[in-house]
Amino acid sequence: MRSKIFDDAKLERLRREAIPSSNESAMAGDAAPHPTDQHPHVDATMDLPVVVDSNDDEIVSHELEQMRSILEEAILETRSTPLENRPRLPRIPLSKRNRAVVRALNPMLVTYLEASWDLCETDSILFGAAVAVCRIIGTKLPMTRRATTQSSAIPAWRKRIEDRIAKARALIGRLTSFRSGNNRPRIVRTVRMAFAGTNISLSQPDITQKLTERIDDLKQKIAAWGKRIRLYREPEVNQ
C-alpha cells in the first residue's frame, strides 16, 4: 500500500522547489529515496497526496500546493480560535524528516509575516504554522478545550466581525503574494475578485500601487472592526 506520508527525499525536493537556487536544476535528478523509519499514523481526513513518482516535478508541485493549503487552513483556524481554547502543541522529535517539513514551510510564511502588523497576528501565524507541521507529519493534536457556555460563548455579532477580519487577513496575504510576483492561478483568481466591479486591470502599469492601496484599505477596516470588538467587550470585562 502506498504511504500517504511525505518521505525524506520528497520533503527535500519540496523545500528546494519553495526556495529555488542557481544550481537547483543540476541537483534535481540526483536525489534518491532513502529508507525511512515507520511513521506515525496520519488521519485519513487529511487526504494527503499519494507518492506516485518521486521524479515527477508535476507531482512535487501538486504536493507543495497541498502543504500550502494545510498551512493556510491552520492559520485561519488559529485566528478564529480564542487563545484559551488553543490545543496544546506536542513535542515533535527532531528527526531529519520533521526538519525537512519545517524547511519546506518556512518560505511559505513570508507572505503572512509581511502582512502582519502586530504581535498578536504574528503569534497566530506561528502557532498556525506549528499546527500545520503536526498535521503534515501525522502527529495528532489533543482535542480543543471546549469553552463553557456561560463564560466563553462568543456572541453572534462578534463571530460575524471575526469572520470578516479572518477573510480580510487572508485576502491581504493573497494580494501581498501577488504583489511579490506570485502568479499562481489561485492567487490571480483571488486578486481579480478583489478588484471586481472596478476599472482596475491586473495588467495596467500602476497595478502595484493599486494593490498597496487595497491592502492599506483592508488593514484600516480590520483595525476598525477590532476596535468595535474591544469597545463592546469593555462593559463585559467591567461587569
Image (spheres, rainbow, N blue to C red):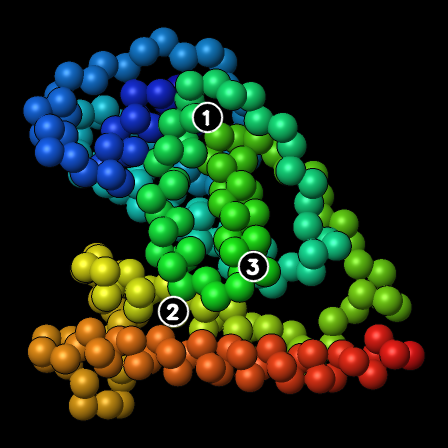
Establish if 93 lies above or below 149: above
Residue 119's label in the rendered image is 3
Q: Secondary structure at mark 3?
A: helix
* Residue 131 in view: yes
- Quadrant of the rendered structure where residue 226 is? bottom right
Residue nearest the observer in this picture, 42 or 83: 83
Upstream in the sequence, badge 2 or badge 1?
1
First along the sequence among labels 3 and 2: 3
47 on left or right of 21: right
- The image quadrant of residue 215 is bottom left
**Label 1, on which residue?**
98
Q: Amino acid at mark 1?
A: Asn
Q: Residue at x 24, y 32 (%)?
A: 16
Please give the residue where the numbered disc 2 appears in the rendered image.
172
For the residues bearing labels 3 and 2, Cβ distance under 8 angstroms: no
Question: Left or right of 231: which side holds 116?
Answer: left
Across and down, in percent, residue 42 comes to 52, 30
Q: Label 2 amino acid?
A: Ile
Write the residue at 52% across / 48% down: 126
Q: Residue at x 91, y 79 (%)?
A: 239
Q: Which mark is residue 232?
A: none
Percent position of residue 72, x then y: 44, 54
Q: Nearer the viewer, mark 3 or mark 2?
A: 3
CA–CA distance in space, label 2 to label 1: 29 Å
Q: Residues within 10 Å of mark 2 (few under 14, many from 20)?
A: many
Residue 135 visible? The answer is no
Give left or right: position of 47 versus 180.
Answer: right
Q: Nearer the viewer, mark 3 or mark 1?
A: 3
